[in-house]
Image: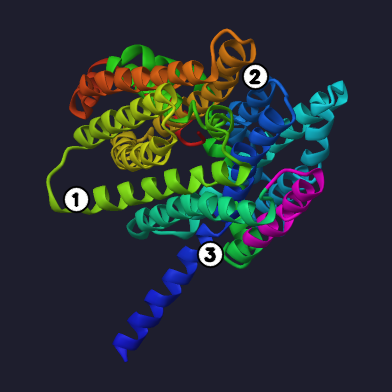
């Protein structure tokens, strides 16, 4: 009987974990449309300046601080006793409906209509706000409905769903839109509300516990108590100023994320311009890279559980391997060897999987008890700014090198991927000089009592 109860509890736990991960399918679908399809169509097929497109696509990263605002508001303003579910669903509806307008916006931009650019920026600013709300409410829901013992496993499954969703999305794109026509693009983007809202509803309805009137009053009182009296950004700045290891790690995260994702918005364009690949062929790039990431994460996860590998070693190995993959991609562009593209993507993805395992673990170690939220918020901000800067810079480099005719596409992309490899090697040199032990030693020496209080206040809400 007890075995049956344990089996049933395990099954229910697995179903709950699966449901909590489902909303990431919709999020991954939206990001895949933007970074795999929308960028290729607007830049490669419609001739829109890459800098304009990648700037639009990078906007949402700079709305990451909006998560703090959304989280505070949801804490203090439950709807029907629920603080996460209604806000996540509303954000899913808002974010997904934006995609219905993007095919028309792309055509308008291609025709040089200024209203197309205005509409594009407005749509993606709105998307940035919606995705910030979805991110905060989803992560808060996971934190509130899981125990500390099971949370790590749930987060691993959620991360896996995020990668899988982009692979699945690229397969669907290949089938629905093998070549560009406005009608096929609209048909593809019309799937977005169904996928995003459907995955959110199936994933979270009934998961969150509805608060009673007494619980609601207690939750509102707690939300008032944890609201910081001081500026959390100032507390973060003080932490970076006082701890050279924290400052170095912030720079490392920014540079590594910048290097990994600099090619994200122009990779499909590269396949078309450098090798004349079709839309269907370049859409498959994400499957190769994402598959490499999953394999790398799984293998390193197993290896690190068997062998005493340091997190810094894993992270450094990931940086060096990713740089090697970027170097092979640069060689493919320079020599015109299209056969090297997919192996280099697999190599990049495989070692990016190593990087994910090591760097995410180091982020959790590079925190201070009582101010975990502050430090995780700092590392998250470094990631967001690295992503945003890479998105804008990729378009700027493409426009400055290739669209202006300054260099040929082959040489331009050689310089592009070579630059990424150099930045990745630089990040490897930085992480080799950092230490979790030195971080905590400096923190204990420099963090005054008032700073620690400020960090605790900020960490409650970041």
Rendered image: mark on residue 51: 2
Magenta highlight range: 179-199
Give the mark nearest the N terminus, 3 or 1.
Answer: 3
Quadrant, the N terminus = bottom left
Q: Determine whether, in the image, residue 32 is placed left or right of residue 242.
A: right
The answer for how far apart the CA atoms under marks 3 and 1 are is: 28 Å
Let me know if residue 69 is in the magenta part: no
Residue at left offset 47%, top offset 16%: 411
Frontmost of labels 2 and 1 is 2
Q: Secondary structure at mark 2?
A: helix
Of helix, strand and loop, which mostly describes the magenta segment? helix
The residue labelled by disc 1 is 303
- Evaluate if marks 3 and 1 touch, with contact meaning CB atoms under 8 Å apart: no
- In the image, 105 versus 442, the foreground residue is 105
Q: Determine whether, in the image, residue 290 is placed left or right of residue 369.
A: right
Question: Can you tell which quarter of the image residue 182 is in?
Answer: top right
Residue 259 location (% of width, % of height):
42, 24
Residue at left offset 15%, top offset 41%: 309
Q: Secondary structure at mark 1?
A: helix
Frontmost of labels 3 and 1 is 1
245 versus 263 height, above or below: above
Q: Is residue 438 visible?
A: yes
Q: Determine whether, in the image, residue 77 is placed left or right of residue 321.
A: right
Residue at left offset 55%, top offset 21%: 394
Give the mark nearest the N terminus, 3 or 2.
Answer: 3
Let me know if residue 187 is in the magenta part: yes
The residue labelled by disc 3 is 19
């Amino acid at each position: 009987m007890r075995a049956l109860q344990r089996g049933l509890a395990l099954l229910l736990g697995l179903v709950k974990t699966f449901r909590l991960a489902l909303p990431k399918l919709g999020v991954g679908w939206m990001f895949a449309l933007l970074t795999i399809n929308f960028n290729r169509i607007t830049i490669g097929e419609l001739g829109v300046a890459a800098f304009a497109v990648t700037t639009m696509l990078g906007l949402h990263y700079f709305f990451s601080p909006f998560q703090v605002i959304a989280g505070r508001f949801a804490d203090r303003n439950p709807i029907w006793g629920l603080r996460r579910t209604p806000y996540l669903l509303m954000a899913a509806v808002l974010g997904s409906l934006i995609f219905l307008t993007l095919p028309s916006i792309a055509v308008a931009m291609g025709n040089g209509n200024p209203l197309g650019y205005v509409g594009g920026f407005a749509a993606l600013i709105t998307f940035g706000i919606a995705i910030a709300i979805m991110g905060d409410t989803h992560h808060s829901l996971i934190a509130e409905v899981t125990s500390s013992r099971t949370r790590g496993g749930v987060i691993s499954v959620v991360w896996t769903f995020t990668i899988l969703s982009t692979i699945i999305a690229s397969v669907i794109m290949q089938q629905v839109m093998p070549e560009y026509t406005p009608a096929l693009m609209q048909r593809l983007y019309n799937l977005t509300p169904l996928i995003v809202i459907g995955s959110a509803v199936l994933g979270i309805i009934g998961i969150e516990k509805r608060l009673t009137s007494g619980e609601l009053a207690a939750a509102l009182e707690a939300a008032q108590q944890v609201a910081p009296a001081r500026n959390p950004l100032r507390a973060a700045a003080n932490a970076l100023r006082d701890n050279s290891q924290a400052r170095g790690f912030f720079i490392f995260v920014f540079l590594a994320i910048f290097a990994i994702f600099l090619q994200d918005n122009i990779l499909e364009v590269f396949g078309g311009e450098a090798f004349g690949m079709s839309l269907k062929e370049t859409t498959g790039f994400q499957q190769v890279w994402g598959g490499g990431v999953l394999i790398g994460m799984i293998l390193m996860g197993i290896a690190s559980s068997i062998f005493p590998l340091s997190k810094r070693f894993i992270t450094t190995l990931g940086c060096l391997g990713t740089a090697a993959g970027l170097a092979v991609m640069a060689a493919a562009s320079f020599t015109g060897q299209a056969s090297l593209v997919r192996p280099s993507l697999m190599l990049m993805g495989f070692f990016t999987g190593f990087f994910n395992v090591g760097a995410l673990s180091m982020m959790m170690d590079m925190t201070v008890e009582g101010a975990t939220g502050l430090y995780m918020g700092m590392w998250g901000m470094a990631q967001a700014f690295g992503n945003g800067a890479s998105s804008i810079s990729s378009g700027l480099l493409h426009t400055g090198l290739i669209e202006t005719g300054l260099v040929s596409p082959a040489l331009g992309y050689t310089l592009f991927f070579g630059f990424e490899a150099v930045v990745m090697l630089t990040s490897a040199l930085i992480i080799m000089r950092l230490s979790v032990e030195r971080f905590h030693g400096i923190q204990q020496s420099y963090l005054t009592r008032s700073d620690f209080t400020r960090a605790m206040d900020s960490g409650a809400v970041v």
